[in-house]
Image (cartoon, grey):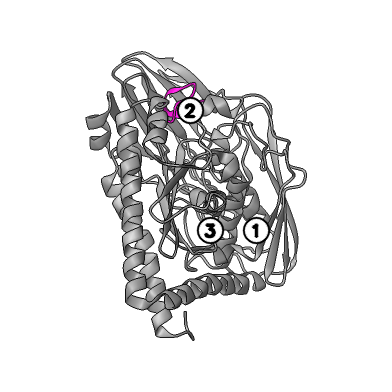
Amino acid sequence: MTGIPVELQVIGSQLSAVADEMNAVLVHSAYSSNIKERRDCSTALFDPAGRMVAQAESIPVHLGAMPEAVEAVMKLDPQLGEVYVLNDPYTGGTHLPDITLVSRTELGFAVSRAHHADVGGMEPASLPSQSRELYQEGLILPPVRLDPGVLTVMLANMRNPDERRGDLRAQRAAHHLAETRVRELVARRGRERVLAAMDELYAYSERRVRAGIAALPDGRYEAEDVLEPVEGTLVIRVAVTIRGDEVEIDFEGTSPQYDGNLNCPLAVCRSACFFVVRCMTDPDVPASGGAFAPVTVKAPLGSLVNAVSPAAVVAGNTETSNRITDALFTAFGKAVATVPAMGQGTMNNITFGNRRFTYYETLGGGQGAGPGYDGPSAVHVTMSNTLNTPVEAFELAYPMRIERYSLRPGTGGAGRWRGGDGIIREIRVLEDCRLSVLSERRLHAPQGAQGGEPGAMGRTLVNGEPLPPKATVALKAGDLVRVETPGGGGYGAPGSGPTPGSGPTAG
């Protein structure tokens, strides 16, 4: 924050440190492997006006949607010391397994969002492949004060309630930490100085993103991509218009919402848009809501990317968000030659569960190559930023065994710079359970850029028999599940020289 008083820089760093410490408390206090090991959670601080001023660098699809959750809770006039809970995708949530807590601090609000391994619904782990309306996906929580009665109702509707209680306690601990740290900061620095630092953090991020947008060529750039529903095809169409230091993103022409679960609430669509613009302009900008201010998102009401309740959304959060980012990067690639090729384009969601346990994980794959570099292998891309569950922790906690966990050689797309490779993960179940798979890029490959070739498509198999991209099946003890994740696209025609051009890189 060059050019502003040093004290404001110090306070701004302290606010960011509070968000990071919240995240550390949540991870280290959590009970489930999904939060403790995979770190499928996010934390942030908001100012008294409900603007995000600091966030831990966690899950992109969580963070852009948080402001709508805070806005919904603010309407209920929360008081200091009260904690509110919600997961309703149509009042600030993303999908039902992501449970959000919002509490008032002495100077604004603290927010945590964590993916819980079960919130009820028609299938264990609450990611059913066949859901057609929101009610089938789990318990729906509009913003409500989290008191003992509400907690009792929540746990009565969730599988493995002791694990759910443990993870909710971890979230509560993160909020207690935030309330304490903000109170200490106000006592040390003074209310007005902290408010001034919050304003500056917000404004500084906005200035940097606007400068990044202004460096892009003005114009209108269009692209489209497709999703892989249970039946048929769904289309994402987007037009990106750059004017000066602002960007308008319009999804006119996108498929209407449909009778399945790839629908997106608008909050998730916005998250994907904000993520791409940040990548295209200034990836290192301080993480605050000011970075979103120069971006306008238009999405037809009742479309796939702005669904109306009670449309099912569980895969919209994980899979459609990835397709939105791929379409947007393709559009920006028509303005800037340095945009890399597509990454794997899916979170490869798999869940296992029965009456005794529930387990959820997402799997990494190949990232796209770019000018001057090969794509990394075996990483989460775009809207996911989780870790893997270590084999030792996995086998200790669940009745399953990892029989293979390796790279999937040769699956990155060829090019002057090669796309990253996917992975192979084989899981043998040791007791009867249910498997649900929500995946993409099984029928349409991740595309290369500037003449690079596509990455390999992914596959999911049970005992050697392939499953469709979205599937729920019953498993018997001894069955083997094999997931082969997609590779990333290549960049530049094989054997070609360096690609000319300069500009921001969408890393």
Q: How many residues crowd mark 2 within 10 Å: few (<14), some (14–19), many (20+)?
A: many
Q: Which residue is drawn at 38% across and 77% down?
A: 190
As measured in the structure, the alpha-carbon distance from the residue carrying label 3 to the one carrying label 2 is 30 Å
Residue at image mark 2:
437
| Mark 2 or mark 1: whose residue is earlier in sequence | 1
Classify mark 1: helix, strand or loop: helix
As measured in the structure, the alpha-carbon distance from the residue carrying label 2 to the one carrying label 1 is 31 Å
Q: In which quarter of the image is residue 23?
A: bottom left
* Residue 378: percent from left, percent from top: 40, 45
| The magenta stretch spans residue 119 | yes
Classify mark 2: helix, strand or loop: strand
With respect to residue 58, does 446 lie above or below? above
Can residue 441 be seen here? The reply is no
Number of numbered discs present? 3
Mark carried by residue 370: 3
Q: Which amino acid does label 1 sit on?
A: Gly
Q: What residue type is labelled 3?
A: Gly
Task: Name the side, left or right, on which 193 lies relative to 174.
Answer: right
* Residue 418: percent from left, percent from top: 49, 52
Please state the extent of the stretch shown in magenta in the rendering. 118-128
Residue at image mark 1:
333
Q: From the viewer's perspective, is the residue at label 1 or at label 3 nearer?
A: 1
Q: Which residue is drawn at 57% across and 51% down?
A: 75
Q: Which amino acid does label 2 sit on?
A: Val
Q: In which quarter of the image is residue 282?
A: bottom right
